[in-house]
Image (cartoon, rainbow, N blue to C red):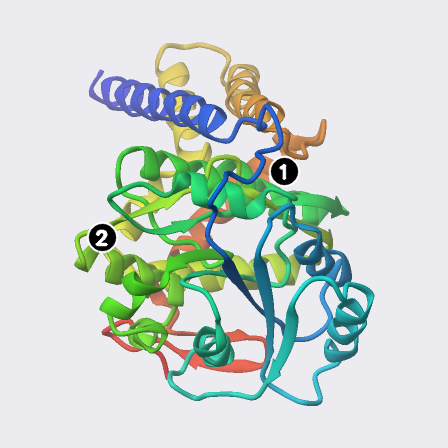
């Protein structure tokens, strides 16, 4: 009876949290009703896009920066190496869109052990405007990208971000990556933001210059191994809030291999453990596997048919996530329950890897995380 009570309580609590989190994310990530036009008197904005190498859809995602419906903005493309193969792509885009002010900045400023931050420093200092959006090269920007970031800003805001939403997956493992990015990680981030615990997400960092300069400038983001974790701590330390823009922006995926998905999720798990250990530790209980085990234990204790009822439990669990994806207009496959279950079976291994691992590779750079969450 004790086992039955524990299993029932755990399953009931996790199922309740699952339903609430899906409802919150479905509301926050719903498809925008209309294109948001620029308001009168909108401030000019600088967009800093760090680029490195040729990624899937890189020309399309970078070109989306030139197609924004915004009256006054400039684009600064930052690349560390003069031999980077993405440079001709950027130069061709600038030639094809001469009406949009854009520059390519080449060089590396080693202000930290974070290669991306080192690449962005020159863009931050060259920015002509007081509002600066730092956006990864694989973010596909909608035409009202800047309006939606500005609309999220409030009097207590120090930073606006948006997590990535995987789209256009090609193959089984890309579908699994969508299950990680969309219905698991984005859902968790929007629930935290709704509770007033917004975390920065490095795909888009939208700053007002005076806020970041008050915390020491862009170089201060080298205080942690990840610039988004450092951004979160800096903004909170100044007494401001990190906010997430509703309806996050696409990251088209293309083809993915199992090893790529594992390495990316392993890197993020190690970063979360290093930068926010108290939030990382409970992650072992997330996903649908342990609630399913608890449900099966309760059914077994009551003498019911375990396997068919467990399958129904998981279909309901992942069916809710499919409903979230459809409400948000995200990609979802009819085989999603299989992708979601595999994701959740990977979560305990990724949690253990994140707990024990100390280093990772990012774009050819071997990075080791120190005990104080700094990097070498």
Q: Is residue 293 above or below residue 145?
A: above
**In percent of the image, x 40 and y 34: which residue is there?**
290
In terms of image quadrants, where is residue 50? bottom right
- Which residue of the protein is positioned furthest toward the front in this rendering? 41
Q: Is residue 32 above or below residue 361?
A: above
Looking at the image, tell me whether mark 1 or mark 2 is earlier in sequence order. Answer: 2
Query: Where is residue 173 drawn, in percent x and y?
Result: 69, 49
**In percent of the image, x 35 and y 79: which residue is there?**
375
Which quadrant is home to the N terminus? top left
Residue labelled with disc 1? 339
Residue labelled with disc 2? 278
Relative to residue 309, is residue 63 drawn left or right? right
Q: How far is disc 1 from disc 2 in space, using C-alphas?
A: 28 Å
**In percent of the image, x 60 and y 66: which residue is there?**
75
Relative to residue 363, is residue 276 drawn left or right? left
Query: Where is residue 261 drawn, in percent x and y?
Result: 61, 57
Query: Where is residue 295 drawn, in percent x and y?
Result: 40, 21
């Amino acid at each position: 009876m004790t086992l039955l009570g524990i299993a029932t309580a755990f399953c009931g609590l996790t199922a309740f949290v699952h339903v609430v989190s899906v409802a919150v994310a479905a509301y926050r990530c719903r498809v925008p009703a209309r294109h948001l036009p620029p308001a009168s008197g909108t401030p000019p904005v600088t967009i800093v896009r760090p680029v490195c190498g040729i990624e899937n859809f890189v020309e399309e995602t970078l070109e989306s920066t030139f197609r924004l419906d915004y009256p006054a903005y400039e684009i600064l493309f930052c690349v560390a190496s003069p031999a980077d193969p993405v440079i001709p792509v950027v130069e061709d885009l600038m030639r094809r869109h001469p009406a949009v002010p854009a520059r390519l900045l080449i060089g590396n400023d080693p202000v930290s052990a974070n290669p991306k931050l080192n690449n962005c420093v020159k863009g931050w200092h060259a920015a002509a405007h007081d509002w600066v959006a730092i956006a990864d090269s694989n973010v596909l920007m909608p035409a009202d990208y800047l309006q939606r970031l500005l609309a999220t800003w409030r009097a207590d805001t120090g930073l606006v971000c948006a997590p990535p939403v995987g789209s256009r997956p090609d193959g089984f493992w890309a579908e699994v990556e969508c299950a990680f990015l969309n219905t698991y990680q984005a859902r968790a981030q929007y629930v935290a933001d709704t509770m007033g615990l917004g975390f920065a997400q490095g795909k888009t960092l939208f700053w007002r210059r005076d806020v970041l300069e008050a915390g020491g400038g862009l170089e201060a983001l080298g205080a942690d191994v990840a610039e988004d974790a450092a951004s979160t701590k800096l903004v909170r330390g100044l007494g401001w809030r990190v906010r997430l823009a509703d309806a996050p922006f696409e990251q088209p995926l293309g083809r993915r291999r199992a090893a790529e998905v594992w390495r990316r999720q392993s890197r993020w798990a190690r970063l979360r453990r290093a930068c926010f250990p108290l939030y990382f530790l409970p992650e072992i209980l997330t996903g649908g596997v342990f609630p399913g085990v608890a449900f099966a234990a309760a059914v077994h204790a009551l003498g019911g048919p375990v396997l068919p009822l467990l399958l129904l439990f998981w279909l309901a669990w992942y069916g809710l996530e499919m409903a979230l994806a459809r409400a948000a207009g995200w990609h979802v496959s009819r085989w999603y329950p299989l992708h979601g279950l595999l994701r959740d079976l990977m979560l305990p291994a990724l949690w253990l890897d994140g707990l024990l691992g100390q280093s990772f590779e990012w774009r050819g750079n071997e990075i080791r995380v120190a005990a104080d969450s700094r990097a070498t």
